[in-house]
Image (spheres, helix red, strand yellow):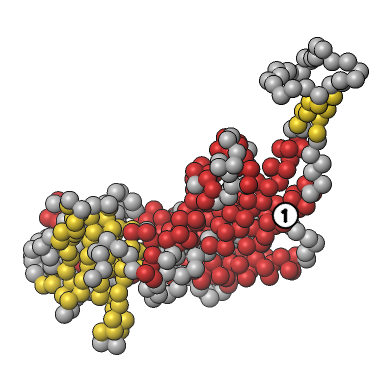
């Protein structure tokens, strides 16, 4: 029988990939703390062969430059998606609850940004809605007073141990989930004969001991689904799959190693070795401006002192390798790390086609993530008894391009012709970067109406 704390094989095999991605996103300190795991030792760093090998390796590691491409690209992706706030709408009675949707105080927009970051890094993230047990007939005011309300908890990939599905009534349904709350607690979610139950396992004296099962209820009735949503860029997938950041982080690792080679070569070019010939092996202290006297030596037993310089004939090739990897990172990252950088002469049309292609892929990911977040929010709303559906959609307009004067004039003309309402026209100006996202459409329409009073429809905004 599988240990309750052991992830399934299909999940465990991805842990090393997630670890690499997180380290390179975290940056230089995280990467260099792994030492030889990301920057292998050279033969001269073998402590069995060279007494000062460890010190030499530390010097080699510390002088290697680190280019934070992964973090910059991920920040760029999140910046594009959250350039505009997500569209979110729920019942008025639930708005205050959604302002604090997680137990640690995040609102819906904070949660969404965290989810996007996790999905980009691992493409395997869970949203769990934790139900409190509420007696039937409890009022909304009483639930708020007692803080009896559902919260959404985000589980990163490493905390998801198992997600098992079965086909129930011709629908693929999650029937078992194991989540690691912390090193001492496992949360097991089970759908047994259509009844959702929770079993908490505690780590005590080296053993995992289950508590009594909990059967959450709503209006004194058991719940018929596990309130857990798996979020990835592959809709309805329950298995880990390739993340957006995978190739970027692997390239960042290769770049780090290439920078180590180039930096090591440059180090020896800049630090020639001083060689003494004709002198017995001993400690010789010297510095700039020092004059050395060697007593007892004649023309027949001369002393020869010279610098042996590292020619570094491969330095240009090593530098070219670094530059090539940086260019590949720019290509894979969609020019996010260097918006105006070009690896060659490209036409405006080619650049626009490439940008549109990259944006369409990112927009597809944003829509898939939106559906999963919306599903989790809808579970909360359903539990609270709201009949109004939740609306949630991440931004897919990634390029800040304002409407031209001609496009603005066309909107005004079509509005005056009665093709759409004043509210729709103002909404188009907001979407077109002419008016700010915070623009109060209803308030503006009221103010315009007050100014016009009994006059005819205004000819402009």
Residue 266 x/y as whole percent = 74, 40
| Pick the front one: 174 or 278 | 278
In front of the other: 432 or 66: 66
Residue 319 to residue 461: above or below: above
Quadrant assignment, res 390: bottom left
- Which SS class for mark 1? helix
Residue drawn 25% across and 84% down?
168
Q: Nearer the viewer, residue 370 or 426?
A: 370
Most distant residue in the front direction: 300
Q: Nearer the viewer, residue 103 or 283?
A: 283
Examine the rendered structure and indicate whether residue 157 appears above or below residue 274: below
> Where residue 8 appears, x then y in whole percent?
33, 68
Seen at 29% across and 88% down, the residue is 170
> Which residue is disc 1 drawn over?
321
How many dots with numbers? 1
Query: What is the quadrant of the C terminus in the image?
Result: bottom right
- Whole-percent x and y of residue 217? 13, 68
Q: Is residue 442 visible?
A: no
Q: Quadrant of the N terminus?
A: bottom left
Among the 4 quarters of the image, the one containing residue 18:
bottom left
User: At x 31% / y 81%, what residue is drawn?
Assistant: 172
Q: Is residue 9 left or right of residue 139?
A: right
């Amino acid at each position: 029988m599988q240990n309750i704390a052991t992830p399934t094989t299909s999940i465990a095999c991805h842990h090393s990939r997630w670890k690499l991605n997180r380290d390179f996103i975290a940056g230089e300190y995280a990467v260099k703390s792994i030492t030889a795991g990301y920057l292998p030792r050279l033969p001269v760093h073998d402590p069995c062969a060279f007494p000062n090998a460890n010190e030499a390796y530390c010097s080699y590691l510390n002088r290697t430059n680190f280019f934070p491409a992964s973090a910059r690209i991920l920040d760029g992706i999140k910046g594009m998606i959250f350039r505009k706030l997500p569209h979110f709408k729920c019942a008025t009675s639930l708005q205050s609850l959604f302002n604090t949707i997680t137990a640690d105080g995040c609102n819906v927009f904070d949660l969404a940004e965290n989810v996007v970051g996790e999905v980009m890094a691992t493409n395997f993230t869970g949203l769990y809605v934790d139900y409190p047990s509420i007696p039937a007939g409890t009022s909304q005011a009483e639930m708020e007073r007692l803080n009896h309300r559902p919260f959404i908890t985000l589980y990163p990939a490493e905390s998801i141990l198992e997600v098992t599905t079965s086909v129930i009534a011709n629908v693929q349904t999650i029937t078992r989930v194991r989540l690691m709350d912390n090193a001492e607690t496992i949360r097991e979610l089970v759908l047994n004969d259509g009844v959702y139950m929770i079993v908490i396992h505690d780590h005590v004296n080296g053993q995992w001991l289950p508590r009594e099962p909990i059967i959450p209820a709503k209006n004194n009735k058991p719940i018929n689904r596990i309130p857990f949503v798996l979020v990835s860029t592959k809709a309805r997938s329950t298995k880990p799959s390739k993340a957006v950041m995978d190739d970027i982080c692997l390239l960042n690792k290769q770049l780090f190693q290439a920078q180590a080679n180039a930096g090591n070569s440059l180090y020896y070019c800049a630090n020639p070795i001083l060689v003494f010939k004709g002198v017995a092996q001993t400690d010789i202290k010297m510095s700039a401006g020092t004059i050395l006297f060697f007593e007892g030596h004649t023309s027949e037993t001369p002393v020869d002192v010279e610098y042996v310089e590292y020619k570094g004939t491969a330095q240009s090739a090593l530098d070219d390798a670094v530059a090539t990897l940086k260019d590949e990172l720019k290509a894979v990252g969609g020019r996010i790390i260097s918006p105006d950088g070009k690896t060659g002469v490209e036409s405006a049309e080619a650049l626009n086609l490439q940008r549109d292609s990259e944006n369409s892929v990112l927009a597809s990911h944003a829509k898939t993530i939106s559906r999963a977040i919306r599903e989790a929010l809808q579970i909360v709303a359903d539990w609270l008894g709201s009949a109004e559906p939740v609306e949630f959609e991440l931004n897919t307009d990634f390029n800040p391009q304002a409407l031209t004067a001609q496009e603005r004039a066309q909107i005004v003309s079509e509005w005056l012709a009665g093709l759409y309402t004043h509210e729709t026209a103002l909404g188009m100006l907001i979407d077109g970067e002419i008016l700010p996202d915070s623009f109060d459409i209803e308030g503006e329409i009221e103010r315009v109406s007050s100014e016009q009073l009994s006059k005819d429809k205004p000819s402009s905004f």
